[in-house]
Amino acid sequence: KMLPLFSVCYPVELLFSHFFFPAMLFPAAQRLKRSSAAFLNPVLQNSLEDVILLYEFLLAELDIDKGQRISIKDEELASLRKAAEFDTICNDIIPKSITEIRRLSSRLSSYPRVLKKEDFERTVLTMVYTAYRAAQSQGHQKDIWAESFVNLYKALKHDLM
C-alpha cells in the first residue's frame, strides 16, 4: 500500500501512523474485553453528577492492596455501576509501574494537541496513584515517585494552558 506521490519514500502506514496518530497514552484502554468484542475504554466523567461521584470515590478512601489493586472502601459507593468503571480504569488501564508512569510522562510532554477527556481523567487518576506511592515510599524511592507526580502535574498544567 503506497501513496503514489510518496511511493518513492514512505509507505502509507508510516506516514499516517507517525503524523496523524501519535503514540497512545493509555494502550491498555485499547485492548478487547475478555468477555466480548468491545474495546475496554470506559470514561467516568460524562456529566457533572459523574464528576461529583468521582470526587466521592476519591474522598471515601481507597484501598490499595499488595498487588497494587485499587478498590473503594465504602461498600455502598463500591456497589454503584460507575464504581465498576472506576475499578476497570484504576486496575486495568492506568499505569502502575514507575517505568510505565515515566513513559506516560514522556509521551504527555510531547503530545501535539489537547488531551481527550478520557486521557485527562486517566492522567489525573495516575497522579492520585503516584501520590499514594510517594506517600508510602521512603528515601530514594519516595523521590522517584514524587518526581513522577510533578511531571504528570506539569503535563496536565500545560494541557490546561
Image (cartoon, grey):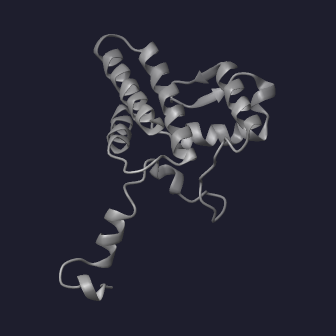
74 on left or right of 145: right
Residue 150 x %, y %: 38, 24
Pick whichever, 160 or 47, lies toward us: 160
Residue 64 x %, y %: 56, 24
Q: Determine whether 81 is above or below 141 in the image.
A: below
Quadrant of the image containing the C terminus: top left
**Residue ID at (45%, 25%):** 130
Q: Determine whether 92 is above or below 150 in the image.
A: below
Residue 131 x %, y %: 47, 21
Quadrant of the image containing the N terminus: bottom left
Count of numbered circles in the view: 0
Pick whichever, 93 or 155, lies toward us: 155
> Which residue extends farthest right?
76
**Residue ID at (28%, 89%):** 4
> Which residue extends farthest bottom?
4
Pick whichever, 106 or 77, lies toward us: 106
Residue 77 x %, y %: 77, 28
> Which residue extends farthest front?
161
> Which residue extends farthest top?
139
Pick whichever, 132 or 158, lies toward us: 158
Q: Determine whether 75 is above or below 156 in the image.
A: above
**Residue ID at (33%, 35%):** 102
Q: Where, by quadrant of the figure, is residue 98 drawn?
A: top left
